[in-house]
Image (cartoon, grey):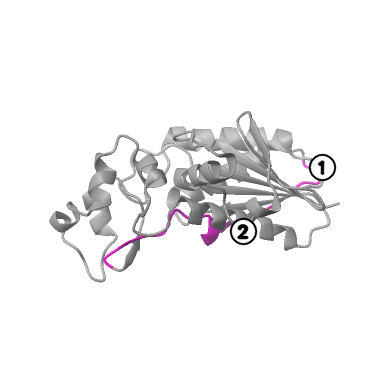
Amino acid sequence: MSTVRIHWLRHGKIASHRGDVPLTDEGLSQARERGRALAEDISPDEVVHFMYAPTLRTRQTVEEIRASMEQALCPDSGVELLEVTEQWAIRNPDIFVAGQRVELVSSVEALAEQLSAPPVDPATLADHPFFSVFWASSDRIGYWVEHPDPPGEGTVAVARRQMTFATSLMEVQEDNPVRYILATHSPVLRAILLCYLGEDPGEPGHLEPIKLTLTTGEAPELCFRDRRRVLDGTAVGESAPG
């Protein structure tokens, strides 16, 4: 019997969402704390993969997690900690402005900085039909979660992308128990929770995980906080429930 455990984690704390910003000192500390907690949960001879969405804050998050796990584990534990790698599948939603993919940043200036071919004037972007409301919202990611037709991927598309990627990891041949630590962003977590647990809890805490357990011959189990759901074949990799 083969078992793969997957943890989607929100990155550590940052000072703002005005661009590709680094973790704060508190965010680095949060990541190290999560690494120590994961070290206590690891089984002997487990193989651990570390992956991050293509942003600085997610890379720093998973680097700190791996480093603190390495410090916390006994040298003879038999646990294999693989090198940190970028994983495009766990990226933020693909949102498009002026023919270019952009991140869900918190200011018109940060949006304009992402647009170079061709550039777009911030004054023009201020009236963008999606982003103008996004910036004014008290829960910006919640606005994207609930939007029926965002300029790019919506929640169902992002959730399906995550689950399809996750279940494909069962195709990787491993002799030992395997765990994947995936550092990503709150829109990804909220899309998974809405589509596969049936509710959007709002912004998850920094480093708060969603856990998926995949075992050969058994239905996948998804866990978040005190909620658990066994996913049937329809819910995994085909069509997220509405």
Q: Which residue position holds label 2?
A: 238
Residue at figure coordinates x 61%, y 59% from the top left = 238
Say left or right for 39 vs 2: left
Name the N-terminal-most of marks 2 and 1.
Answer: 1
Say left or right for 69 vs 11: right
Query: Which of the 4 image quadrants contains residue 44?
Result: top right
Circle 1 residues within 10 Å: few <14, some 14–19, many ≥20? few
Residue at figure coordinates x 39%, y 39% from the top left = 14
Distance of mark 2 from mark 1, alpha carbons?
Answer: 34 Å
User: What SS does tag 2 mark?
Assistant: loop
Residue at figure coordinates x 47%, y 46% from the top left = 185
Say left or right for 71 vs 87: right
Q: Which residue position holds label 1?
A: 44
88 versus 202 height, above or below: below
User: What SS does tag 1 mark?
Assistant: loop
| Magenta stretch in the rendered image | 75-98
| Disc ID at residue 219 | none
Query: Is 77 included in the stretch rendered in magenta?
Result: yes
Coordinates of residue 172 in the picture (x, y in percent): 74, 62
Residue type at the position of mark 1: Pro
Residue type at the position of mark 2: Glu
Query: Is 15 included in the stretch rendered in magenta?
Result: no
